Image (cartoon, grey):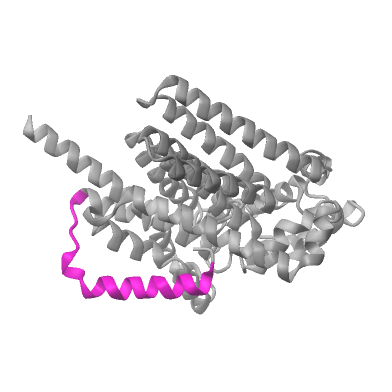
Amino acid sequence: MIFRKPCSFIIIVFGVFNLLFVKRLKFTKTSLILVLCIASPLLLEILFFWNNDSYSKGLKALEKSTSLLLFPLFIIGNYQRVNFLKTVQIYCIATTILILFFLIRFTVIFPELITKYLNGIDLFEIGYKFSDSIGIHAPALNMHLAFVSVCALYFVFYSFINNEITISKTFRFVVFLLSFFFVLFVNTRIALIGVLLGYILVVSFAIKTRINIKKMALIVVTAIVLLGGILFIFIQKNPYMKEKYSKVTFAYMDKVGKLDEIDHPEIKVFNSLVTRVSVWKSAWELSVKNLPFGVGASDGKPELNKYFAETNQHFLAKYEFPTHNQFLDFLLKFGILGPIVALLYMLTIAYFGYDLKNALILSFFLIFFICNLTDDYLLRFDGIAFSGLWASIFASYWMQQKVIVYKEQEAV
């Protein structure tokens, strides 16, 4: 998921492999509805393909979204064979080990950056430089890591609930602490909010389990003390974090739509909220002008950049900012139907979590939903493949649980 080219290759192999065993696929009316819900962003692009100025660019946009059909078809079609907890566990541990390896590699290849970081110099750049070193945008990487960290905390509670041996509990706790450190190291605001909300969900659901209250209290207090300690030390060693989460984020909010009036905006507000709001304002204005069908899937960014130039927003035009909001992005591209489909796609995941009372699925929904309020992951390959894979796994787990309930009801 983190590396686009290997991920693309594996998805192709996955598709071909499943085509060889296509006769094993089993669908019900319910599972077909779930397939359509998860594939809805792709189906929307197909429906509005005629609205693209360039069909070749339209096909390129479709190509990025094909996993939204492959994953639900082949995973939900084989839903009986999906082992939900084992899959999440492998993903959590493997990703943590992988990121640890790349962090060690980063310190060896870029010792000067680590030295600057430890000395409190240019602290804002380290997370982005690390992400660039493994070929992924920092907010996208931290979206993955946020979910990994929530899963890691879940398995800490899981180990106590199931009375696993001490070495297993210790290993899970180390994985959790590492995963939380990685989220802080990459240091993107939205992912940090998402991961903290996910922790609250996991703890809330864990409290309702059969685990001994004293044991639960001990785990929660230990986790809070360690997390608080890590966060405190991190902030003390990274004073820019205080500035980033307060002054930088909310600076110049009186300059919405007038960023060129700021002296050197690329230095002062490149990553500030005012820049996002200025982009959202322009995207909304352009979307309203192109209702009801939008400008086309391949033309959203070019048309938005053109609008920046037409409205004399030279800073935004120079750096060609995307919409940075998935709902506005789909509104601009597909008109009225766009944000409805984006919401349907995300609420499908939320429904699985709510119906199953599952903290991991609900946490995934929260992280992905919040990330898409300030970014547009359904136009990025990493967001499309990441959400499509997990939505399909969640759907399979939901189907399994429904079958179990149905059998129990029949037995009664």
Q: Is residue 11 magenta?
A: yes
For residue 296, say whether it is visible.
no
Which residue extends farthest left? Answer: 411
**Residue drawn at (83%, 50%), measured in percent from left and top?**
258
Magenta region, residue range: 3-29
Q: Position of residue 321 (x, y in %)?
A: 70, 60
**Number of numbered markers:** 0
Q: Picture quarter containing residue 239?
A: top right
Please tell me which residue is depicted at 43% across the width and 76% down the height of the picture: 9
User: Residue drawn at (66%, 51%), measured in percent from left and top?
Assistant: 285
Could you say which is closer to the camera, residue 52 or residue 235? 235
Dominant secondary structure (helix, strand or loop) of the stretch shown in magenta: helix
Where residue 234 sits in the image (x, y, percent)? 74, 43
In the image, 318 versus 169, the foreground residue is: 169
- Up-down: is 33 above or below 55? above
Residue 155 position (above or below residue 315): above
Whole-percent x, y for residue 251 in the image = 82, 42
189 lies left or right of 60: right
Residues 68 and 215: in front is: 215
Residue 156 seen from this side:
yes
